Image (cartoon, rainbow, N blue to C red):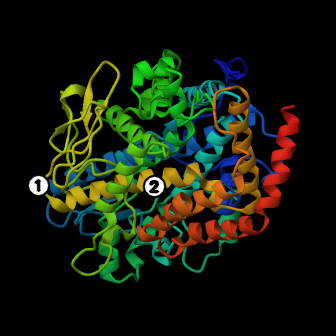
Amino acid sequence: MSRRAAGEHSLEHELPPIDVDTGATELQLRIFKQSWKNVSARQPIGSAENPPDIEALADFASAILERRLTDVVRYRREAKLANKSLRSSSSSDDSGGANLTNGIVKRVRGGETATLNSSSSAQHNYDRILLTSRCRSQLRKFVKHIASMYNDNYYHGLEHAIHVTMGADKLLDMLHDGSVDFLDSSNEDFMASEPYLKPHQSKDDMDASMQNGSTFSSSAAREAESSSSVPPSTADQHNQVYSDTFAKFAFVFAGFIHDVDHQGVPNARLVEEDDPICNTYGRISVAEKHSIKVAFRTLNESDYDEFRSTVYETNEDKLRLHRIIHSIVLSTDIASPERMRETKKRWQEAFSKHDPDGTSNAFSRLSLAGKYTATEEIATVQASKLQVVSCEVNDIRRGGEHDPRGELLMKRNSMTRTLQLEGGQTVEYFASSSNEDDIKTALRHSVMLETMLNVADVSHAMQSWELFCFWNKKLYQELYSAFKAGRSKNDPSIGWYQNELNFFRGYIIPLAEKMKKSGVFGDRGEEWTKNAKRIRDRWKKEGERISEEMIDSVKQDFA
């Protein structure tokens, strides 16, 4: 049964606009403060009592999307101001930008210095509104609309989508937690929405300042840049990377929509039943492709014009969002052998080799994009400017051989993949490049986004024991429900205990280890593997008993 009636097109009360001084909401603070192990929309975690309703779940998604979209708009405004200042300073005399006084902030971008005077006419003309009241209302209305289209599945339902979205959001925050370097004021990989933790300032001090109305702002970091004590080599590395706010918005957006209108059965069953969506999307990753289609079709409705225009400032933004969403949502189809082979190959291509200096390269700090560099759009999936290409499915070839399934394998130095947008247009999002480093960097960013969403998708197996047991039962209930309804030939009660151990060994542990091997999360890279192994070891001891009790309980519920 669909939730549509509960949330479709409900009118939002008037929301105040978000401006440059707006502080975090209480819910945003609650989400921000949750540790990875306890990320959950349910409190207490793992409790079967008092499940959150659609309104509460929609509030979580709205708070996260609103925070990330605010970052996007803030960055765009600051980038335009910086560009304007650079043009202005380049036309002034040699000493015009040399004198730094109070009220002037120095920012380094790709070796160039821009001086921003807070009292300048450009600053006075700066639009203080980041998200209008109408945009905020439409964002929340969109969230409720998508939420209403999640079916009441035991596992692949709205609460799972919110859990994935919250996990994805936390992973983005954790990018900055792996090393003290991330907290240093010279770090250009600093996100506007993340509170700046000054040296010698405790987490409690930061939380208190946020509660007192401090904004999610990086201004403190900028003001401290001139007194940085970071070694030049480290600072140079940080200045080469930054956090791509648009990719981060796309990432949490993907988490929210990735299972919308899921039927509660695997893709293989949809293909076996010759479900109508197979006629539209082929026979690979059909549920994921359908969810993507539903999400963008909804976003394109007239009710969301201002929200959509805020996300899509340009047509290139629109293509970029399509590109990112397709890449990472399709990667969540872990039941597809073809998809898993491609994912494995892409990971090996991105991370199997080291740079000549013996390190895993400068990617030890995830940038997710390149700003003011030779490569402008290396975020997520491409190494050079977006190109629209014509491509007939029947003409797509795999390694020189015709592939009737229309799937692509990337080849080194020719990493070309396509996705089909509405209207039949296809977009090349692994553009060819003569620069091997650009290609490698683009691939790494793409693969890391995919890996991180895969982690968020099965986060309960890398968090706490309570969350694992809760979602483990939810998954069993969904599979058993399909079995009882005649939509599955497999009785999940047979071998459930051992199958869980096999899943840890074959998928969860290797996935968790990628988080460490990538180098992206610094000192925190082992957290997912440690949690997963701790849960696995406890399952070895208690899993048989828990499985028997769960199987009996669910059987009685379905009697």
Q: Residue at x 65, y 19 (%)?
A: 8
Can you see residue 107? no
Residue 434 numbered tag: 1
Measuring from the top left, give residue 316's x and y in whole percent. Answer: 29, 34
Element carrying mark 1: loop
- Placement of the C terminus among the 4 image quadrants: top right
Q: Residue at x 45, y 76 (%)?
A: 181
- Residue type at mark 2? Thr
Left or right: residue 396 versus residue 142 is left
Give the quadrant of residue 66.
top right
Instruction: Single out the mark in the foreground, 1 or 2.
Output: 2
- Residue type at mark 1? Ser
Left or right: residue 520 versus residue 144 is left
Q: Residue at x 33, y 26 (%)?
A: 421
Tag 2 residue: 451
Left or right: residue 481 versus residue 462 is right
Q: Number of numbered discs present?
A: 2
- Placement of the N terminus among the 4 image quadrants: top right
